[in-house]
Amino acid sequence: MRSPRRTITSLTIASLLASSVLATPAAAQQRVEVGNVASVVGDVTLDNDQLRRPIEVERQQRVAWGDLIETERNSQLQILLLDRSNFGIGARSRVRIDRYVYDPNEGRSLFASFLEGALRFFSGADEGDNSAEITTPAGRIGIRGTAIDMLVGDEAEDIAEDEDFVGSVRSDDDEATLVVLRGPGANALSGVTPGLAEVTGAGVTIVLDGPGLAAYIPREGAAPIGPFRISNGGLARVQDQISPRWARSFEDGGIPDEVVAGVAAAAVIGIILGTRGGGDDDSGPTVDAGSILGGGDNDRCEDANGRPIPCSQID
């Protein structure tokens, strides 16, 4: 007959083993994929805790929780998530997918860290309760059903401080965060619900709820400045960080397939957002058809919800 002491000891060991298994993070047990790379230009690497060293990113590569994406100079890519949300990542940028949960019947929740560079987020399917939260070194941006541009670093500082509303403030060129709401606007396609972005820093939150509205967090521990309507010149500079001119126009006339795919998809997004540019009226800033947001084969075009449409509809 087994002694009581031995029985208790065995149960204790079993309990400890069970607790150890339950305490192991899910990400360490299996790779939780959230989408794939729809287009990539230049030198882009992916790193995570399971890799010995960063790997070069290729088109159609899977992206998962914990993946850190880093782009070099003259490089950029687009990530297409399961709900057809888009990350357009500019040059010299670092972005990490921290958590992503998607249920077609319930909605999507996304948490990401944007550490440096230029980023455009375009929300995908509008069914269910969809939310996204992106943290930067200076603050946090909550997103509901919209498209936003974000810059972190010295370019954010330079562009923001040239805006009359911001002017000269004490900024940190590693932490400065500029956020611009891009749409949808009043001329968006029927059924597309305008969204908003909540920009939070130092416990203060301001809401961006109209195309062209912007907010600036100069450094960690500082409250956001805004909302203010960014100038057309400022918006053009933001656009050039998201999708630089080198990616939109090549002197030798050769344009990579990935760039062509991105231009086509961005044109569709411009139609959906319903924004248009020019002048100082209230029509909102231009969504440049050259932004790298798209992917897929050149002879197949889709709207933002993934429905096939004739490519002839894309100007």
Image (cartoon, rainbow, N blue to C red):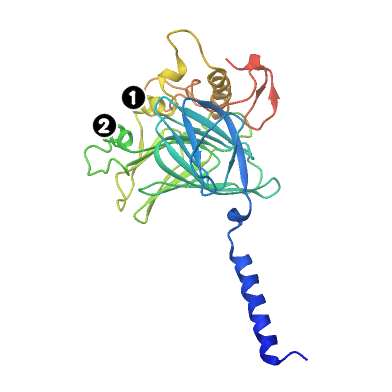
User: Which residue does the numbered mark 2 point to in the structure image?
Assistant: 162
Residue 37 position in % (x across, y down)? 58, 33
- Secondary structure under tag 1 reads helix
| Image quarter (top left, top right, bottom left or bottom right) of the C terminus | top right
The picture quadrant where one finds residue 3 is bottom right
Residue type at the position of mark 1: Gly
Q: Residues within 10 Å of mark 1 (few under 14, many from 20)?
A: few
Q: State the mark number for residue 233.
A: 1
Residue found at the very far right of the displayed protein: 1
Choose between 69 and 144: the one closer to the eye.
Answer: 69
Q: Residues within 10 Å of mark 2 (few under 14, many from 20)?
A: some
Residue found at the very far top of the displayed protein: 252
Choose between 40 and 79: the one closer to the eye.
Answer: 40
| Image quarter (top left, top right, bottom left or bottom right) of the N terminus | bottom right
Whether the residues at callouts 1 and 2 have beta carbons within 8 Å, the answer is yes
Q: Is residue 109 placed above or below 120 in the rendered structure?
A: below
